[in-house]
Amino acid sequence: MSYRLSLGSHRYHWHDLKILLARASPPRSGDFLAGVAAATMEERVAARLALADLPLARFLDEALVPYESDEITRLIVDTHDAAAFAEISALTVGEFRNWLLADTTGEAALCRVAPGITPEMAAAVSKLMRNQDLVLAASKCRVVTRFRNTLGLPGRLAVRLQPNHPTDDARGIAAAILDGLLYGCGDAVIGINPASDNLPAITRLLVLVEELRLRYEVPTQSCVLTRVTNTLRAIEQGAPVDLVFQSIAGTQAANAAFGIDLALLAEARAAALSLGRGTLGDNVMYFETGQGSALSAAAHHGLDQQTCEARAYGVARHFRPLLTNTVVGFIGPEYLYDGKEIIRAGLEDHFCGKLLGVPMGCDVCYTNHAEADQDDMDNLLTLLGVAGVNFIMGVPGADDIMLNYQSTSFHDALYLRAALGLRRAPEFEDWLARMNLIDATGRLLRPAPGQPLLAHAASLATPG
């Protein structure tokens, strides 16, 4: 179906819905690279006006990627909750924006309609929103998950402790873990990106974190962020696997470039559930996403990168993950050129994921060849904190020495918690209090001489 709109003396014509969505997107380098961006600001405004008048129900009738050839489209269509959608089914995209921002629309209503919102609807409404709209609407969405602790509660901010090392050195990784714990980080997950993607190395890392976790009775979960096939093999060999990690995208072809499909994800989730390692809940998956991944695999089907990204959250929602985060600036300036584009993309991703009922975090990050700096990341970090992000990254010094990009540090988490009055996951905070690392208000304490974590960290500096 084609779409038309007259703006002044100019008549615009878009051949289908995916072109309309692309033209309505805020400018970003990836869409220009793909040849789908609006040619002028006037065309972008016209596309948004046309999109605002489009009934939400249209997205149920016009597939952006063909149903017959894409299993993500089939997942979105076949699992759509018509009863949940009924409450908003009469709205246009513009009216949906107004409904989301209305004072009378709160957490209960957003939770109620989430199963009826398709990723394409979420992407569409985000294109009509200012940054403050994305912050406000996302702050109303609450997605709570559990494994060994409880994540996503109001007034809480969790941190993934990311102790990567360029050679997977056990002492270096252990030192980074202990450093993060002493700063009160690690309640989301202790998650390691391995430099060596072979099963023995992965197993050694899993055992390392497991031994530290058990030694100090830390109420958190671990994950080695390897390919899902490696994690399945590790489970088969009896490794202590808590969470199954996988990067995911919004089209079948893009996921195929990652070496996965929905059946493999279902197999991996079933394998992790069979271990029964969660003490509070059974959210066993950890997903990462990022705008531009489908384009980089030449698997975007002419979609703009933000709509592709929203479809990835449709995949995540189906598998009920503990954690999902957008690694927002990691892919590079070919997709998000500068700080302005990275900030906008981070807010869009967080909003769309939360609106769909996905437990969203964000790796607030950039690569060294992007037109961005740490001040841009401070801005995005603060905006996401106000928006109610479930978790952020905690990297020693904010500089990942294995992946070679800039993220957020343990100190950044302290800043955001102090500035916004945010606490850690309750079970993790209780443990920090027992370890005499925080006071009754949650404020970090200087570790006393002989404190077990401090003593362990000091021992790592001793040869042998």
Image (tube, rainbow, N blue to C red):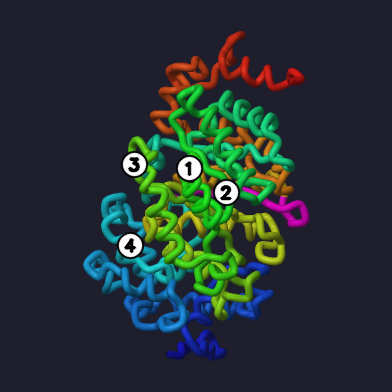
Mark-to-mark CA distance, 1 and 4: 49 Å
The three-letter amino acid code for the residue at tag 1 is Gly
Q: Residue at x 63, y 57 (%)?
A: 342
Query: Helix, strand, or loop for circle 1?
Result: loop
Callout 3, which amino acid? Answer: Gly
**Residue 99 disc label:** 4
Q: Which residue is mark 1?
A: 238
Which quadrant would the C terminus be assigned to in this image?
Answer: top right
Q: Which residue is mark 2?
A: 225
Magenta stretch? 359-372
Q: Quadrant of residue 41?
A: bottom right
Earlier sequence position, callout 3 versus callout 4: 4
Q: CA distance from mark 2 to mark 4?
A: 38 Å
Sequence-wise, the earlier of marks 2 and 1 is 2
Looking at the picture, which amino acid does disc 2 mark?
Leu
Which residue does the numbered mark 3 point to in the structure image?
Answer: 281
Does residue 438 belong to the magenta stretch?
Answer: no
Q: CA distance from mark 3 to mark 4?
A: 33 Å
Query: Visible in this render: residue 137?
Result: no
Can see residue 173? Answer: yes
Task: Tell me the element at label 3.
Answer: loop
Tag nearer the camera, 2 or 4: 2
Measure the alpha-carbon separation of dots 3 and 1.
Answer: 21 Å
Amino acid on which the number 4 mark rests in the picture: Trp
* Mark sitting earlier along the chain (2/4): 4
